[in-house]
Amino acid sequence: MRREVPLAITFITGFLLIIGFFIPHDPIGGLQSMFLQWYAIIAGFTMVLGLMTLTRIHTRRIVKRTQGFGYSVILIGAMLGTLVVGFYSGIKYKGLFELGTPFMWYYNNILVPLSATMFSLLAFFIASAAYRAFRARTIEATLLLIAGVLVMIGRVPVGNLIWNKLPIIAEWIMNIPQLAAKRGILIGVALGMIATSLRIILGIERTYLK
Amino acid sequence: MLKKIANIDRRIIFIVIVLCIIIPFLTKTVLEIRVSAPVKSAYKALEKLESGSCVLFSVDYDPASQPELQPMLIAVLRHAFKKNLKVIMMCHWPLGFPLGQDALMVTAKEYDKKYGQDYVNLGYRPGMSAIMLGIGREIRDFFASDYAGTPVDSLDIMKGVHNYGDITLLIGFEAGATGDYWVRLAGAQFGQKITLGCTAVCAPDCYPYLQAKQIEGLIGGLKGAAEYEKLVECPGAGIIGMTAQSAGHIAIIIFIILGNLSYFILKKREKE
Amino acid sequence: MFLLIFLLQLSPPLNVQVFDTPNDKGKSISIKWKLSPDDSVLSYYEVFRTTDKKHEYYSRGIVLRGLNKFDDSTQDGEKYWYKVRAVSPTDFADSEPLGPVISYAQWFHHKRWNALILGIVFCGLVLWYIKKAKHGGSLFIRKISGLEAVDDAVGRATESGKPILYLTGLSDMSDVATIASLSILGRVAKRAATYGTPLLVPCYDPIVMSAAQEVVKQAHMEAGRPDTYNESKIFYLTADQFGYAAGVNGIMLREKPGAVFLQGYFFAESLLLAETGNSIGAIQIAGTPATTQLPFFVAACDYTLIGEEMYAASSYLSKEPTLLGSIKGEDFVKLIIIIVISIGILLASLSSFGILKTSASNFINWFSGF
């Protein structure tokens, strides 16, 4: 039963959503939108599940004083701090997200710089990965190298200053060879996705239900 | 020496990149921007709309992508307000909501627009694909109230806005795959006209949609933002960032050339 | 004077059509019209309706000038009459009343015939090959080096006494890539349990975490080592993209895993993760259907599963005939698509020379019809 019930739910919902795509008439059409609303509600509850797991794991680490439990203290502290600031802003001000509320200050001055720092690391990692990977070892690698350099230079204003045809060449690479390869992979991905979905709906693929 | 060039310590690469990015910001050098065809199409799609048309802005990014996408959002909002379009904003990324709200409030103030009449922020709701499909039927099924809890039926701007049929253009600002879902669900199933603005790393994913005319236009990365700023004649963070980006790209190309030269010389020596 | 009044009179919208909205679940009537010749001076169009021809019409909504379509909500089975008014700041002009029209729900979406036919063909082929495989038909599947290396990677991590790090990507359980990733996780977890190698699975989504816990638990049971299963090794990290990347990078630098598996849907954080894995010298096997992230994985990882190779993983690793059959069916559909694209290219090329113009446009329209 532990396996059969989820498999039956998957089959019924999957089948109804597929036929709902072709049959707009009630009850099929109505069922489809009802399932979508259920999905939206359940998706909201996953946040609570995440919050509970996070709190449980890190509280356990703090209680057991495992190695690096200090980070757990910071995590729980930051989480509670955000919650308190959020409630305070919501109660005292008109809305949580109005300009000038403590929550927005917290968001703009802590979360934004931290996230932006992580994202900006990409620039450095891309530079070092490009330096390491772009070596003209074979003919294919040489073509990749030439295309990469042309796109890199053609996509920034300095490329236009060097030679006004460079942006056009970069655009051509993006529009023709890049797109041709991408479409090939996309068609394969789409078919793989349909086949996997079919296996899941029919209950042939059960690995996710172990 | 050649071996060292062939295997430069990545910390040296990092330092060079830092300098290439910081120096242009300090010197405030501005380069001439050439507007590309995808951005021009995006601009035209908004420009041709009648004043009073409803435009749905979907803010689907978080602070990490703010440097790339926020200048883009601000430039497009300025364009929309300049043209007296009605702006409805929503987001699929919870952390993107304050960014959208911030941009909305700043630009609305510039053009003296009133909340509830000229623009509205519906906020965040979980369940991305369900929402996208649901708007095809009735937007109120998911957004019965705006971000502050005000019922949407009490807002003038929402009167007569029920589904995609009442939204003239949808503009998605994307840091992930949300743009794909907009195209597949709102575009393919409901015929909604869509323009996408996305991070540079996501832009190549949108080219198939642009070529197949599934989207009206594409604004890619900080460069796209700079081009849009040029078109709406409101220079901002996009145009300023272009010099730094140019310097960064040139530095990477120089490293690649050095790496290849040393690789070939070493290979030749090995053969000899 | 009369001529002047006639010339100044506003023209109403032309050729107004009122009909039941097609391909819907009822409760809607569509009104379409040709723009008034005076559209440029209009403020808007206003749609009026009545349920009794003898009674007065009442407003149902306004449409901006330049637009020519309005969908009205109705009660199915009731009769409605409509007219459309062109409104300028000083004047207005009504179209002729039209009706009665009744709204009703449709049993089939007529614009989706092509999707239905292609869907039936595809599903039919996949099911046929599954059936064939069940009856013992031989099926060949080419070697996928990324999947062949899975066991080696686990072995290497075990030899070096280091843990294994497994990432399921940044998508939720509704994404097929995540499900494919969990299939590979099952295999990795079973091997790791057999060798007694610790397996760390930091998750981006709480539901994926629960599913991953179940998969790893089952793998430990199958390997005969239920005692070594530790639930806290499969944990939720954060649902913030770069917060997750920072957390995983921290784990990589602290725990120094011997093997890193990046399987699932990744975004801009892919290179941050792969480069950090590369810097600690771990053997890395990546797999994603995200085409934009593939170059980063190819540059920084030892093996990369490209797009559909990842979806084929569970079939490839289990070698179960029913699963292999579906891959065979998929390949056959790919062949059909290649043939269709080739015919399309041929017809489009011929039509540019004026040959078979109608056939080419019919062919293309049928496939792009929905």
Image (tube, helix red, strand yellow):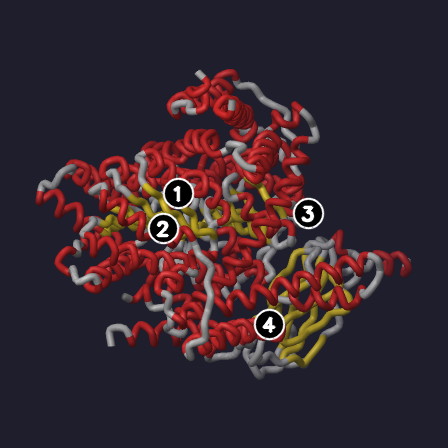
Cβ–Cβ under 8 Å for marks 1 and 3: no
Q: Chain of mark 3?
A: B
In this figure, which residue is indicated by the disc labeled 4?
C112
Residue B190: x %, y % from top left:
57, 63
Rounded to the nearest whole Å, what is the CA distance between mark 2 and mark 3? Answer: 55 Å
In this figure, which residue is indicated by the disc labeled 3?
B48
Residue C264 in sight in this render: yes
Disc 4 vs disc 2: which is toward the camera?
Answer: 2
The kind of secondary structure element at disc 4 is helix
Residue B129: x %, y % from top left:
45, 60
In this figure, which residue is indicated by the disc labeled 2?
C149
Q: Are marks 2 and 3 on the same chain?
A: no
How many C-alpha atoms fall within 10 Å of the one at disc 3: few (<14), some, or many (≥20)?
Answer: few
Q: Quadrant of the N terminus of chain C?
A: bottom right
Q: Chain of mark 2?
A: C
Q: Quadrant of the C terminus of chain C?
A: bottom right
